[in-house]
């Protein structure tokens, strides 16, 4: 897993007007012992969408770099160098110098300049609460009984609150950052409590016997907490919260009514940007997973209800993509560099069934799928399916070396970063992502089962058989 350090980018003012300075950020710094010749900055401009802008710059001969990028409001980004990636908290007009040794990124990061206060907190918080196993739900604390588990969560929350309170007494930070930090604490607690039962099941424990009032805490959660919108803990909680409520509602036809139920709940319970964000998130999931019933109706309602221009534009693009990359549409053409060094095109596999996947460096679920890939390929050997796997964002030489060493089956292709055309054409917003393409070039699944899923190979084989059966009619 990659090191997750929250940093705040700053702005180098030389040559810029005051107005320009307040709408840009610049990260300056140096990478010692670099493992590649560049650094990449991803700006997540639309909360919860994992979409935005990519900025790549070359390192100088001595490892120095400068990245200037437009930022009009506080947002998250990600700085990538080789196999290291750090989460960024960006605010307009800041100026921060960041230096690190690529051999030990987390423990060697040094910062100075405008924005240092906010990011020193996030770095210290990371080291204290996210790197220390005693504060984590997994691997050990999840096995506790209800009373002991809730005591663990509350003690952790109190420690985090005290940590933040002490820091704010000694340092001055922006109001936006204060709200962000508070949301991180409160929604981490709420999400871990909400998902307690599900996670226990996933690790093989028996379902716990819960007190009748276990979920009453949900009535006290402020779903519209200021500053929470760009916080990952908040997004994780909202996803799980509305899924939990949808299942509790027990719609007559859960498979058909699932997304409309989620959408209606988010529309009713959330306000402002959070409301637009979650309705957009649910619509995006419906598009991505090939959900057809009521999609047009939800889209038209969103157009009427949404106020935030970023989400309106995002969903308009998603909807066009859904209509273009939906079930039954023609799979977008592409040509990419392979691990063998040649160029490979989708058109090369005309009249073949193609299983197309997308992985990204340091994606935990992607790693699980990589470990299962050989067995997955063996199970599908009789189906004459072409396995195409696109790796995104890894250093080219490192990627080639890994593919050669691990001897993954199938054909492995390379996309340099999140701005790659193939990701936009296939509307890949999260990883891993898998598609099943029929011999005639049409998409028969935009959410194909993962190789690491227990029923992955069986369900892909069944989908192939079903296609051939239907084609004969």
Image: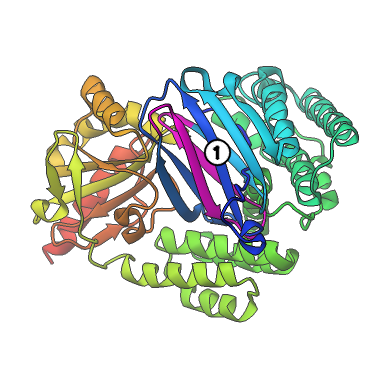
- Which quadrant would the C terminus be assigned to in this image? bottom left
All told, the count of numbered labels is 1
Name the residue: 73% across, 41% down.
Answer: 184
**Residue sitting at the far right:** 169
Depth check: give the residue in front, 389 or 125.
125
Residue 218 lies in the magenta-colored region: no
Depth check: give the residue in front, 393 or 287.
393
Q: Residue 28 sits in which quadrant?
A: top right
Left or right relative to 278: residue 257: left
In the rendered image, residue 449, in percent from the top left (x then y), is placed at 35, 45
Residue that mark 1 sits on? 28
* Residue 363 appears in view: no
Q: Magenta segment, principal secondary structure?
A: strand
The local secondary structure at tag 1 comes to strand
In the rendered image, residue 354, in percent from the top left (x then y), is placed at 19, 49
Q: Mark 1 Cα within 10 Å, few/some/many (few <14, many 20+)?
A: some
In the rendered image, residue 136, in percent from the top left (x then y), is placed at 67, 25
Name the residue: 35% across, 32% down.
Answer: 37
Depth check: give the residue in front, 161 or 353.
161
Left or right relative to 405: residue 150: right
Left or right relative to 202: residue 250: right
Residue 75 lies in the magenta-colored region: yes
Magenta residue span: 60-84
């Amino acid at each position: 897993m990659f090191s997750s350090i929250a940093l705040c980018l700053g702005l180098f003012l030389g040559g810029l007007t005051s107005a320009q300075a307040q709408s840009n950020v610049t990260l300056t710094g140096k990478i010692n012992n670099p493992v590649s010749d560049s650094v990449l900055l991803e700006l997540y401009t639309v909360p919860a969408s994992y979409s935005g802008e990519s900025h790549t710059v070359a390192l100088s001969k001595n490892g120095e770099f400068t990245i200037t990028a437009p930022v009009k409001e506080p947002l998250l980004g990600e700085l990538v160098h080789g196999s290291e990636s750090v989460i960024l908290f960006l605010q307009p007009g800041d100026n921060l110098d960041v230096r690190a040794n690529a051999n030990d990124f987390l423990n060697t990061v040094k910062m100075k300049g405008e924005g240092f206060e906010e990011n020193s907190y996030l770095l210290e918080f990371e080291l204290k609460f996210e790197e220390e196993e005693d504060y984590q739900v997994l691997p050990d604390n999840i096995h506790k009984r209800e009373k002991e588990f809730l005591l663990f969560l509350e003690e952790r929350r109190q420690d985090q609150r005290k940590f933040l309170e002490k820091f704010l007494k000694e340092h001055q930070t922006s109001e936006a950052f204060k709200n962000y930090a508070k949301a991180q604490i409160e929604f981490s607690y709420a999400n871990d409590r909400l998902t307690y039962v599900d996670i226990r099941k996933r690790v093989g424990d028996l379902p716990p016997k819960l007190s009748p009032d276990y979920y009453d805490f949900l009535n006290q959660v402020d779903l519209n907490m200021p500053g929470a919108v760009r916080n990952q803990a908040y997004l994780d909680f909202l996803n799980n919260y509305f899924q939990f409520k949808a299942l509790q509602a027990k719609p007559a036809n859960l498979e058909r009514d699932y997304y409309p139920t989620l959408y209606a709940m988010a529309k009713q319970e959330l306000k402002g940007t959070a409301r637009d964000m979650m309705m957009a998130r649910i619509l995006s999931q419906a598009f991505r997973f090939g959900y057809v019933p009521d999609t047009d109706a939800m889209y038209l309602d969103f157009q009427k209800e949404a106020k935030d221009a970023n989400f309106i534009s995002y969903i308009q693009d998603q909807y066009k993509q859904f209509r273009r990359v939906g079930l039954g549409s023609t799979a977008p053409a592409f040509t990419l560099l392979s691990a063998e060094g040649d160029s490979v095109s989708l058109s090369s596999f005309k009249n073949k069934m193609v299983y197309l996947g997308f992985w990204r460096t340091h994606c935990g679920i992607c790693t699980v799928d990589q470990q299962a890939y050989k067995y997955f390929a063996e199970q599908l050997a009789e189906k004459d399916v072409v396995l195409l796997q696109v790796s995104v964002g890894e250093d080219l030489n490192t990627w080639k070396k890994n593919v050669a060493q691990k001897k993954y089956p199938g054909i492995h292709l390379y996309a340099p970063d999140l701005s790659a055309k193939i990701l936009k054409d296939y509307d890949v917003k999260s990883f891993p992502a898998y598609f099943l393409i029929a011999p005639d070039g049409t998409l028969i699944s935009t959410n194909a089962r993962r190789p690491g899923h227990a029923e992955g190979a069986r369900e892909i084989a069944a989908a192939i058989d079903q296609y051939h059966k239907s084609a004969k009619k």
